[in-house]
Image (cartoon, rainbow, N blue to C red):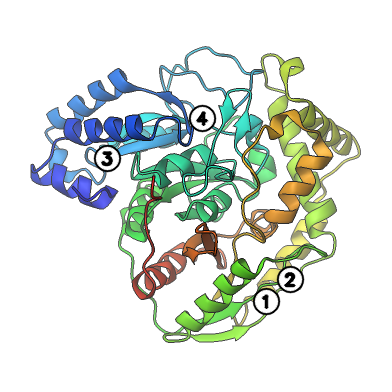
Amino acid sequence: MEWTATAISADVRAGHLTAREALEEALARIERTAGVTEGWQVVRREAARAEADLVDARADRDALPLAGVPVAIKDNIPVAGEPMRCGSRATDDALQPADHLLVRRLRDAGAVVVGLTRVPELCIWGATDSAFGITRNPWDTSRTPGGSSGGTAAVVAAGDVPIGHGNDGMGSIRIPAAACGLVGIKPGRGVVPRDTETSAWNDMAEQGPLATTVADTALMFSVLAGDPSYAQVEEPCRLRIAISTKAPAPGIPVAAAWRAAAEDTGRLLAQVHEVARRTPRYPATLMTSTALALWTTGSAEEAALLAAPSLMERRNKVHTGLGRALAGRGLPTPGPREAWRRIAEEFFQDVDVLVTPTLAQPPVKARDWHRTGWTRTMLANARYAPFAAPWNVAGWPAMSVPAGLDAGGRPVGVQLVGRPGSERTLLGVAAQIERLRPWQRVAPV
C-alpha cells in the first residue's frame, strides 16, 4: 500500500483496506525500526488495536477524512489512559483522564492513535533527548531529529506512521521537519485551538502536523483546525516571493547547503512567480531580549505546574529561573513584540511569501544534552536554528518544506512565511515546490 494518510484513508473508506490492517502495518514498521530512532515514548499496541476495530465498525467510515490512519501524538498533550510526561521525571505519571481537544478531533476523523512520541524536557530545546532516552534522526543517527517535536518527526521520517502531531513555540515543528526531510506547518494564532492550562509560552506556541507530503499535511491540518477546506490545496498564480538567507540574529553563519536550499528554491519558484532577494529588517534585540523573555517566562509558567520541580534537569532549572526573574521585573512587555509586528507588516506590504533556510546549520549531534549546562545548550541551539523563532514572536504562519539533501545525505529544507491568514497560500506554494522538485519521503532505514 502507499504509506500516506491520503491513500490509507481513501482505501479504508472504499473498503479496500481495514483500519486494523493499516494499524498492523504500522506496528510491523515500528518493530523494524526499533532501536533506530528511539522516537516513541509509548506504543499503544493493544489500545490502538481496539481503536482500529472501532473505526472498522463505524457506520460513517466512508465519510471519515482520516479513516484508519495511524497517527503519532507528541507527549505534551493529554491522551486518555496514558501518562503525559513532557520529557520530564518531574511530571506526574498518572494516566490522563481525557483526550486533548485535538486528539478528540483526530479520533473523530477516524485516525488511530498508535502512541506518544518523545520530547526534550518541557519541550524547551531544539534537540530531543531527556532522562527517557536520546532520540535520533533516521537519516543520520549521529544527529538529532531536532526538537521539540523530534520524536514525532523521527517516527514519521522513519516510516512508522504517515503523519504525526507536533507543536511549535520557537520552531518546534519546523526545526524537526527540516532536520528529517518532512513538511510541517505552524499556523498563525488562533487557527488551531490550543486547549492548554498555560499561556502557551506567551501565545507563541501553536499546534500543527508533520507529514511526508503536502497533501497529508493539509489533510491533517484541516482536521486539527476543524475546517475541511484546508485539505483542498490549490497552487497559487503569480505571487511576490522574497528570498532571504540572512540569519535573524547577528553573527550566525549559514551553512552553504542551507543557503543554497533557499536560493535554489527561489530559482524554482521564478518559473511561476515574481522572485526577488529581500530581507526583513530584524531588530537587533529580536532574538535576545524579546524572544528570550517570552521563551523563558513562558517556560517558567509551565514549570510551576510540575509535580516535582526539584527533579527538573539542571539546565532547565536555570532556564525557568531566568524566566521567573524576568517576570519579577515585569517582562515581557508588549512594546518590542508590537514593534516587530509593525516591521513585518511593512515588509509584507509588497511581499506575499518569504522564503528562508529553515536551519542555519545541520542538526546538532544526538547526545545527552540534558546533562549539559544551560549556556552550552543555548549556544548550540542558537547557532543551528535561528530562523524560526521570529515568526512565533509575531504569531504569523510559517512552514518548512524539504529542499533535497546535503553532501552528507542529510535533508535540507526551506521555510515559507506569510502574513496572518495565509496558511492556504503557504500550502499551495509548498505543493508547487513538491511538484517541481519532488523529494524522497522517507529515510532509507
Residue 272 visible (yes or no): yes
Tell me how far mark 3 sits from mark 1, CA to CA: 40 Å
Name which residue type carries label 3: Val
Instruction: Give the secondary structure at mark 4.
Output: loop
Q: Residues within 10 Å of mark 4 (few under 14, many from 20)?
A: many
Q: Which mark is residue 343?
A: 2
Q: Dot 3 corresponds to which residue? A: 69
Q: CA distance from mark 3 to mark 4?
A: 19 Å
Q: Amino acid at mark 1?
A: Phe
Which residue is pictured at 36% across the width and 48% down the height?
220
Using the image as rendered, state which of residue 107 and residue 179 is in the foreground: 179
Verify CB contact (< 8 Å) between mark 1 and mark 2.
yes
Q: Quadrant of residue 238?
A: bottom left
Q: Write down the residue under mark 4.
A: 75
Q: Tell me the amino acid under the disc marked 4.
A: Asp
Label 4–label 1 contact, CB within 8 A: no
Relative to 257, is 47 above or below? above
- Asked which secondary structure carries label 3, the reply is loop
Q: Residue furthest top?
A: 94
- Label 3 Cα neighbours within 10 Å, binned few <14 / some 14-19 / many ≥20: many
* Of callouts 3 and 2, the N-terminal one: 3
| Category of crowding for the residue at label 1, using alpha-carbon neighbours closer than 10 angstroms: few (below 14), some (14–19), many (at least 20) | some
> Residue 347 has which mark?
1
Q: Is residue 11 left or right of residue 150?
A: left
| View extreme (right): residue | 329
Viewer-nearest of discs 4 and 1: 4
Left or right of residue 252: residue 73: left
CA gap between label 4 and label 2 equals: 35 Å
